């Protein structure tokens, strides 16, 4: 059970009003390491970007201020520029909150208002969010047996120009790939006097980032209401009954528009997504201690009716007839319309049973049965129970008269087994068709590409846990250790099929993916002086091993993400998240004195073994966190150090940076001397050591062929990293001072997130900035937006 406790009104000193405000600023945390010595061009020769696509690279001459012809024909000194800092701004956030809580007789009231306004690092990227909460709890009846709770929340979120991720020509990633001697500020006007995008010729499909931030717009706005009511009746001191009703509904309206004047199509689109979920539930609970001697227990029985509906309507037109007239009727072809509607219901019965003995021994059992509308009649009912037990053996031994060591304060052991069921999205049982229109406006019909199976069953996750907790020396030091094993079975996946079958995939139950590991927490009050200095610390370590025990019959692997020659897969019998790609061509004869060395071609350049093989795995060997908190007379200081140990990640960002000569590794120590690649070449009598020198350009172009078609092995990085995650400093002003201001409390503070990257192996790329945030392919990094360092200043005043 996950219990979430929200704020309720309570009797407060003074007016019960609290005002909070904060101001934050964000900048790039770490960034790829770029070379700052060589300008645009090819093979050491400068060339205008308008002459050849090769000149879009940074393989030109050393930039020493010599005069060259710029992209616009002007003579300028050749030097390198920091285009990332020149284009991006520091992001800012402002957050204001006002809350009121007070109790009037038998009614508690709580209300709050919060407003956030943020400006992103990318120019013209904005976010606004407003939340309002009202909550009231009333107790009534002869002995206040009844309680009635009502709560309503409203939220509005509006976003403008959300930045894109990945290696998209409209992304900030463009800034990294620009020739090092091209100054992005030359294009800050965004457009020419004729209204065309200001950009250099020969740029292909690249888009001026300034133009993109002004004239390639997207916006979305969401209005959300959540409502909750609960009536509770304390029938007796040991028997209660309650009924609840709740609703969550929101509407998101979105638009996108691209202006004329760039390689991107002048287009327009809009969409509307609505969602509503209602829940009605009831619960009867009986609980009594010392029911039979020292034996006590409780039982709960209840049910829930869930109804979920959503609809999605999107419209779009391609090229516009009248430029920049953003209307669905202004397309060169009829607007496309996509409409989807979903309706899902789940009816549930559930219960809980508990037995306890003298408050040191407990057994809990739960059960739940769901009936879902998304599965077939024969399979729509699924049952999942759980059972857990715990023993506070220190209390038990004391109860039985056993004397414990003075240093042992508390000891507990626990174990549990649980199952959790899960269904699937609506309308996945049977093959469906769709109605559309062709470019001429004629009605068309088609079949969805997934072959659905009416016999699929619910997913089932089984978890077994064992743990122990101990505390020592008056509860000042303690630890908690937990071992777990989880098996996800009957997973609902779309298994790829041969397209010649008429389907791209089929829906099946498959797989048994097992997670097992350990979590360890050690904490202590190192210094404990309520009137002076106090210091508490905790250390957390976790290790998880994720294995694919089986997939479907005849299926050995399932693709999780990636593209071209690089993919992240789940392979039967292996570890989840294996990374596949190509390797350097190496000597495979174990009897050869050169076994394992890279085979080079006649020019002294590495050769590529085209076989796709496993080259890494995304799983870490462990996660570590160290938290420390200090307090001294109203001053509070806390900081967290955390780390990821092991695991691999493929970096498509480094592929692009090195192929274009932008990366610092392409100019070691600011130089581009020829060098001899370690390896062997084929001779008349076998392999011989390589002695032929190659240029930096030829080497990196051989290794980092664009679109992940080079040597994948060269771009597998150790994802180990350690960082000072955050630092928080707060000061509660003394009451003697605060009372003179007619206030109840006054607190000021400052915090910083992503303070310091202590260790990383990825050349200025944060291992946490993975590309596949929407999937499980976390071992694949591809030009994700950089992570940020954030400073936050806050103020809290209570009246």
Image (cartoon, grey):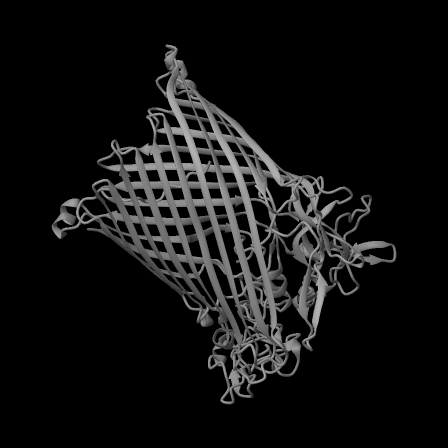
In the image, residue 78 lies at what x, y percent? 53, 79
In the image, residue 196 lies at what x, y percent? 54, 85
In the image, residue 310 lies at what x, y percent? 53, 56
In the image, residue 375 lies at what x, y percent? 64, 45
Examine the rendered structure and indicate whether residue 584 appears above or below residue 142.
Answer: below
Residue at the limit of the structure toward the right, as seen here: 684
Is 253 positioned to the left or the right of 179 in the image? Answer: left
Residue at the limit of the structure toward the top, as seen here: 401
Is residue 60 shown to the viewer in this render? no
Examine the rendered structure and indicate whether residue 238 appears above or below residue 676.
Answer: above
Q: Nearer the viewer, residue 136 or 373?
A: 373
Is 690 positioned to the left or the right of 258 in the image? Answer: right
Examine the rendered structure and indicate whether residue 243 appears above or below residue 437.
Answer: above
Is 567 positioned to the left or the right of 142 in the image? Answer: right
Count numbered badges in the picture: 0
Examine the rendered structure and indicate whether residue 584 appears above or below residue 390.
Answer: below
Residue at the limit of the structure toward the front, as seen here: 142
Is residue 91 shown to the viewer in this render? yes
The quarter holding residue 295 reads: top left
Q: Nearer the viewer, residue 61 or 10?
A: 10
Q: Nearer the viewer, residue 260 or 545?
A: 260
């Amino acid at each position: 059970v996950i219990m979430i406790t929200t704020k309720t009104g309570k009797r407060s000193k003074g007016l019960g009003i609290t005002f909070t405000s904060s101001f934050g600023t964000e900048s790039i945390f770490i960034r790829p390491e770029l070379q700052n010595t060589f300008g645009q061009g090819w093979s050491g020769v400068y060339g205008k970007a308008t002459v050849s696509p090769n000149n879009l690279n940074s393989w030109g001459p050393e930039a020493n201020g010599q005069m060259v012809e710029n992209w616009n024909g002007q003579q300028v000194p050749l030097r390198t520029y920091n285009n990332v800092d020149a284009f991006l701004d520091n992001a800012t956030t402002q957050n204001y909150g006002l809350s009121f809580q007070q109790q009037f007789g038998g009614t508690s009231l709580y209300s709050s208002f919060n407003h956030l306004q943020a400006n992103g690092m990318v120019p013209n990227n904005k976010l606004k969010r407003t939340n309002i909460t009202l909550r009231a709890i009333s107790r009534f009846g002869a002995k206040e047996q009844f309680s009635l709770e009502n709560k309503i929340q409203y939220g509005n979120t509006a976003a403008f120009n959300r930045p894109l991720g990945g290696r998209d020509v409209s992304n900030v990633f463009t800034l990294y790939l620009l020739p090092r001697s091209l100054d992005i500020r030359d294009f800050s006007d965004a457009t020419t006097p004729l209204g065309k995008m200001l950009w250099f010729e020969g740029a292909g499909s690249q888009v001026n980032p300034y133009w993109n931030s002004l004239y390639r717009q997207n916006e979305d706005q969401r209005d959300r209401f959540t409502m909750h009511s609960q009536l509770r009746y304390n029938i007796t001191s040991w028997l209660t009954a309650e009924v609840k009703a709740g609703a969550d509904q929101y509407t998101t309206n979105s638009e996108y528009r691209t202006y004329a004047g760039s390689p991107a199509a002048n287009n327009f689109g809009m969409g509307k997504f609505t969602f509503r979920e209602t829940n009605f539930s009831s619960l009867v609970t009986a609980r009594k201690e010392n029911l039979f001697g020292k034996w006590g227990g409780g039982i709960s029985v209840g049910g829930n009716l869930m109804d979920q509906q959503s609809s999605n309507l999107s419209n779009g037109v391609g090229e516009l007839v009248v430029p920049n007239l953003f209307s669905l009727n202004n397309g060169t072809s009829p607007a496309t319309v996509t409409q989807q509607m979903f309706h899902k219901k789940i009816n549930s019965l559930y219960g809980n049973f508990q037995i306890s003995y003298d408050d040191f021994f407990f057994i809990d059992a739960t059960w739940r049965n769901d009936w879902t509308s998304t599965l077939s009649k024969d399979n729509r009912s699924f049952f999942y129970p759980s059972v857990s037990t715990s023993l506070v053996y220190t209390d038990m031994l004391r109860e039985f008269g056993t004397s414990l060591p003075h240093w042992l304060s508390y000891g507990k052991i626990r174990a549990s087994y649980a199952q959790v069921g899960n269904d699937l999205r609506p309308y996945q049982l049977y093959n469906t068709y769709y109605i559309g229109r062709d470019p001429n406006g004629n009605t068309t019909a088609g079949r969805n590409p997934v072959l659905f199976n009416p016999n699929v069953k619910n997913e089932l996750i089984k978890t077994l846990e064992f743990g122990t907790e101990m505390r020592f020396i008056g509860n000042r030091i303690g630890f908690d250790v937990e071992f777990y094993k989880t098996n996800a079975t009957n997973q609902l996946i779309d298994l790829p099929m041969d397209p010649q079958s008429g389907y791209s995939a089929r829906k099946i139950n498959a797989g048994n993916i097992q997670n097992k590991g350990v979590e360890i927490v050690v904490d202590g009050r190192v210094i404990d002086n309520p009137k002076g200095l106090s210091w508490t610390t905790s250390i957390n370590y976790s290790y998880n091993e994720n294995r694919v025990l089986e997939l479907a019959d005849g299926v050995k692997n399932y693709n999780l993400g990636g593209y071209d020659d690089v993919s992240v897969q789940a392979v039967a019998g292996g570890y989840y998240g294996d990374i596949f790609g190509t390797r350097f061509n190496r000597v495979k004869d174990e009897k050869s004195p050169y076994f394992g060395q890279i085979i080079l071609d006649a020019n002294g350049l590495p050769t590529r073994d085209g076989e796709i093989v496993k080259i890494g795995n995304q799983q870490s060997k462990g996660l570590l966190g160290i938290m420390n908190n200090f307090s001294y007379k109203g001053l509070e200081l806390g900081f967290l150090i955390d780390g990821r140990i092991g695991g691999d990640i493929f970096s498509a960002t480094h592929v692009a940076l090195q192929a274009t000569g932008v990366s610092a590794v392409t100019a070691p120590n600011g130089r581009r001397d020829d060098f001899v690649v370690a390896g062997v070449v084929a001779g008349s009598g076998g392999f011989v050591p390589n002695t032929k020198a190659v240029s930096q350009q030829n080497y990196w172009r051989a290794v980092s062929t664009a679109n992940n078609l080079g040597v994948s092995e060269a771009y597998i990085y150790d994802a180990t990293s350690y960082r000072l995650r955050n630092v928080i400093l707060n000061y509660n002003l003394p009451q003697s001072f605060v009372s003179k201001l007619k206030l109840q409390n006054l607190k000021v503070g400052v915090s910083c997130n992503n303070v310091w990257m202590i260790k990383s192996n990825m050349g200025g790329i944060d291992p946490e900035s993975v590309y596949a945030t929407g999937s499980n392919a976390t071992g694949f990094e591809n030009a994700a937006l950089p992570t940020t360092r954030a400073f936050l200043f806050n103020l809290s005043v209570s009246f």
